[in-house]
Amino acid sequence: MPGIMFAARGLVVSFSVFVIVYCFLSLAVLLAWRNISVHIGQRPVRRIADLLFTVRMFPLMAAAAITTAFTVPSFLLLEPRATDEPLIGMPLALGMCGVLLCIFGIVNAAVAVRRASRTVSNWTSKAQSIASCEPVPILRISPAVPAMTTAGIVHPKILLSGTAEAMLTGNELRTALNHELEHVRRRDNLKKLFLRAVAFPGMAALDAAWLEATEMASDDAAVSSASDALDLAAALIKLSRLGTVNPSADLTAALVHSSASFMNARVERLIAWSADRLAPARRFSPWYGLAAALATVAVFAVTYSQLLAEVHTATEWLVR
């Protein structure tokens, strides 16, 4: 019985810390992301997309890291096995909120996977394999919409409607396929699944900003010259006339799916294409990352015991 109560207290404390850190950091991101977007507006759009996704996932990653690296060890090492502290009041409520938050994220992601699977299954019920851009197969589908989209996470595939295939010239089709292949390389459908798992009130605008940045990043990766940019712009214009993908098509990356205003912005950006966008991204030596990791480990090695004691003191205050 004491062992069960000790484990129960540990779970309550861990989930309480997790939900507190997660909600606090999510609110901080919610308040700060617009200022972040202003300062990164002149950076390459690929970096903007990566940064926005990192910022969006930061609350979950930080909360999980703090809970795993500090809260759980401090409880196991410093909490007495036998205590009369009851599991009631605020700690229990916070612990239940943490459990419900995790369950909600898992269920929300699972629902998105199931809905996407059902939708893609309907699209591909009479699909024909027409080509393969290794290692991604291309399937011709009967519905006119989606005109072109990337579906799947573990085994991605590009779906191309017969109507879209007939409308596009060879070069327009090539650049449009390059756009979808970039979504595969960047694993954007997997990232969308992660965003489903970390849904938080008020984050819709940040999610939309990330989605727009990923589309522009894929546009940039799909073209290598002004003529390619014009071909992709022409493909967007032609395919937008067929209509856009229903918003319920979760976990897919359609070439044409956004509002008319954003589609116009993409077309205008492609028409104004310049060779500056071909400049290679600045790469940092992996030795910098290794040095930073070693320095971090060294700092924690020296202060870890003290940090655990401080965390245990904080959790003791929490459960009282």
Image (cartoon, rainbow, N blue to C red):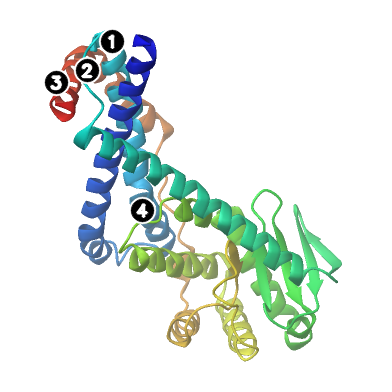
Q: The disc labelled 2 sits on which kind of residue? A: Leu
Question: Which of the two discs, 1 and 2, labels the residue nearer the N terminus?
Answer: 1
- In the image, residue 119 lies at what x, y percent? 68, 68
Which sits earlier in the primary sequence, circle 2 or circle 4? 4
The disc placed on residue 308 is: 2
Whether tag 1 and tag 2 are in contact, CB under 8 A, the answer is: yes
Residue under the image location 47 percent in, 80 percent down: 266
Circle 3: residue type: Thr
Q: Which mark is in front, 4 or 1?
A: 1
Q: Position of residue 292 (x, y in %)?
A: 31, 28
The residue sitting at 43% across, 86% down in the picture is 261
The three-letter code of the residue at mark 1 reads Leu
Residue that badge 4 annotates: 56
Separation (CA) of disc 3 from disc 4? 30 Å
- Residue drawn where x is 57% and y is 51% of the image: 110
Residue 88 shows up from this direction: yes
Report the disc number at residue 34.
none
Separation of residues labelled 1 and 2 (CA atoms): 9 Å
The residue lying at 42 percent from left, 54 percent from top is 50
